[in-house]
Amino acid sequence: MTETLSRIDARYRLFERLKSGPGRTTGYRMTDAHELDRLEKAGLLVWANARYGARYAIDKPGLDDLLAADLIPVIHAGQPEVIPAVRAATPNVEWTVIQLECDAETARSRIVARDTGDVDLRLAARDATPWIDADLTINTSSAEPGEVAQTIDALRTG
């Protein structure tokens, strides 16, 4: 989805969260536990969580770098608590919150295609994620990525 957004406007940029631990590396800035601990002690983590045997974090310097470059960070997060944390860390930024949803069958097929080996765990996490009061909710089960990206961009640019 973020790739499709970037084709509409090159300023859209995936915010690559920091990650320490096993699993996929694509789409993350890989680091180690010591660095995450250091950033946390320095008060530079906006949000952190542990899931699937790994630690993930949104760091203030990473956000600041994208914003200073006049880019539009796209943050993928499954925890609603990320939203107020990011807003508090960047009080001068107007964020648009998009909730993407899909039916269980679509979710399962996408998870299987990612080949992470933990389908049931990821489906349980999906089912446990509460709904939020988003600026826009889009069901991606049948919507094409281009259509979704156009809708998101139109909402943001008003």
Image (cartoon, rainbow, N blue to C red):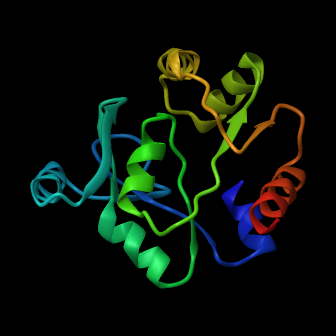
Residue drawn where x is 55% and y is 22% of the image: 130
Is residue 101 rendered to the left or right of residue 95? right
Is residue 86 rendered to the left or right of residue 115? left
Is residue 46 rendered to the left or right of residue 122? left
Does 15 sit above or below residue 6? Answer: above
The percent coordinates of residue 49 (x first, y second) are 31, 37
Residue drawn where x is 51% and y is 16% of the image: 128
- How many tags in the picture? 0
The percent coordinates of residue 4 (x first, y second) are 77, 62
| Quadrant in the picture for residue 44 | bottom left
Name the residue nearer the viewer: 16 or 95.
95
Residue drawn where x is 67% and y is 39% of the image: 99
Residue drawn where x is 44% and y is 45% of the image: 84
Looking at the figure, which quarter contains the C terminus? bottom right
Name the residue nearer the viewer: 133 or 122.
133
The percent coordinates of residue 144 (x first, y second) are 88, 46
| Quadrant in the picture for residue 9 | bottom right
